[in-house]
Amino acid sequence: MANTWNEHEALDGGNREKGVITQVEFRIFQREIQQVLQAIQTTLAKEITRNVKVRWVAKISEKGLILLVNAIRFHVGS
């Protein structure tokens, strides 16, 4: 979304020095950054949870496979 004001014009319509932002603009920027960081944190939490579940299931599957192989060996061997 493009800014509709001149880069030297503050949100309240007053003039300002080049490169200086108003407190309102800073608060808007701060809120946007917080929202982005929250989205990143949520995404990371979901990915970590998913990866842990996948590893847990894989470990259980591996143990189950070992138990199955041992059971087959036991029954074949007897």
Image (tube, rainbow, N blue to C red):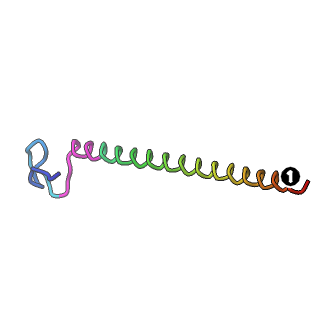
> Type of residue at label 1?
His
Q: For residue 23, what is the image quadrant?
A: top left
- The question of residue 20 being in magenta is answered with yes
- The question of residue 26 being in magenta is answered with yes
Residue at the image point whose x is 41% and y is 49% from the top: 40
Instruction: Depth check: give the residue in front, 36 or 59.
Output: 59
Residue 29 lies left or right of residue 78; in this view the side is left
Residue at the image point whose x is 14% and y is 51% from the top: 3
Bounds of the magenta segment: 19-29
Q: Establish if 12 lies above or below 54.
A: above
Instruction: Depth check: give the residue in front, 3 or 53.
Output: 53
Residue at the image point whose x is 20% and y is 53% from the top: 20
Prevailing secondary structure class for the magenta stretch in the rendered image: helix
Instruction: Depth check: give the residue in front, 62 or 70.
Output: 70
Q: Secondary structure at mark 1?
A: helix
For disc 1, the marked residue is 75
Residue 57 lies, in percent from the top left, at 63, 48
Q: How many marks?
A: 1
Residue 71 lies left or right of residue 23; in this view the side is right
Residue 45 lies, in percent from the top left, at 49, 46
Binning the other alpha carbons within 10 Å of mark 1 as few (below 14), some (14 to 19) or many (20 upward) gives: few
Residue at the image point whose x is 84% and y is 56% from the top: 73
Instruction: Depth check: give the residue in front, 7 or 54.
Output: 54
Residue 55 lies left or right of residue 3; in this view the side is right
Residue 77 lies, in percent from the top left, at 89, 57
Residue 47 lies, in percent from the top left, at 50, 50
